[in-house]
Structures are given as C-alpha cells and as structure tokens.
C-alpha cells in the first residue's frame, strides 16, 4: 500500500502575548504537526527556528511558574 503525498501545511503565525506593545520586540510562533516555529515578526523572510512540541511545552510551562 502506498501513501499519497500529504499537502504541505502553511504556517499560521500569531504574535506572542509577551511581545512589546511598541512594535520593537515582536516574536511570532506557528504550530505545526510535529514542531513549533518561532520568528521575528519584523523580518518575515529571515530564517525561523523550529523546536519540538515537547520542548515548546516545557518552555511555556516553565515561564508560567
């Protein structure tokens, strides 16, 4: 049985609630099936980082303490 290629999911970016209100410190993230993407919202075409969903969860939970 062969698997049909799955369509590539385009990231849906959202701004961090901790980003600065003066638009100088903007971080955006996008949830993907196997990871979370993070980028600078002022540099949309620059590289982004990819972290595992597990690492992202640990990061978020640690920041809530």
Image (cartoon, rainbow, N blue to C red):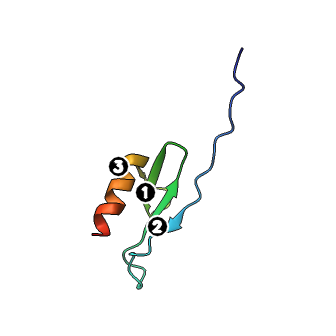
Separation of marks 1 and 3 at Cα, in angstroms: 12 Å
Q: Residue 50: give x, y in percent of width and height.
A: 41, 47
Within 10 Å of disc 2 (Cα), the crowding (few <14, some 14-19, many 20+) is: many
In the rendered view, would you say 46 is above or below 54?
A: below
Residue drawn at 47 percent across, 60 percent down: 29
In this rendering, the label closer to the viewer, 1 or 3: 3
The N terminus is located in which quarter?
top right
Q: Residue 25: give x, y in percent of width and height.
A: 36, 75
Q: Quadrant of residue 40?
A: bottom left
Residue drawn at 27 percent across, 69 percent down: 65
In this rendering, the label closer to the viewer, 2 or 3: 3
Residue drawn at 68 percent across, 34 percent down: 6
Which one is earlier in the sequence, the residue at label 1 or at label 3?
1
Q: Nearer the viewer, residue 52 or 23?
A: 52
Label 1: which residue?
38
Label 2: which residue?
41
Q: Which of 41 and 55 is in front in this view?
A: 55
Label 3: which residue?
55
Q: Residue furthest front?
A: 65
In this rendering, the label closer to the viewer, 1 or 2: 1
Within 10 Å of disc 3 (Cα), the crowding (few <14, some 14-19, many 20+) is: few
């Amino acid at each position: 049985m062969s698997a049909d290629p799955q369509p590539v999911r385009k990231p849906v970016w959202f701004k961090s609630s901790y980003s600065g209100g003066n638009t100088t410190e903007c971080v955006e993230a996008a949830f993907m099936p196997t990871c979370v993407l993070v980028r600078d919202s002022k540099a949309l075409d620059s590289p982004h980082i990819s972290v595992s969903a597990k690492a992202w969860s640990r990061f978020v939970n640690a920041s809530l303490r």
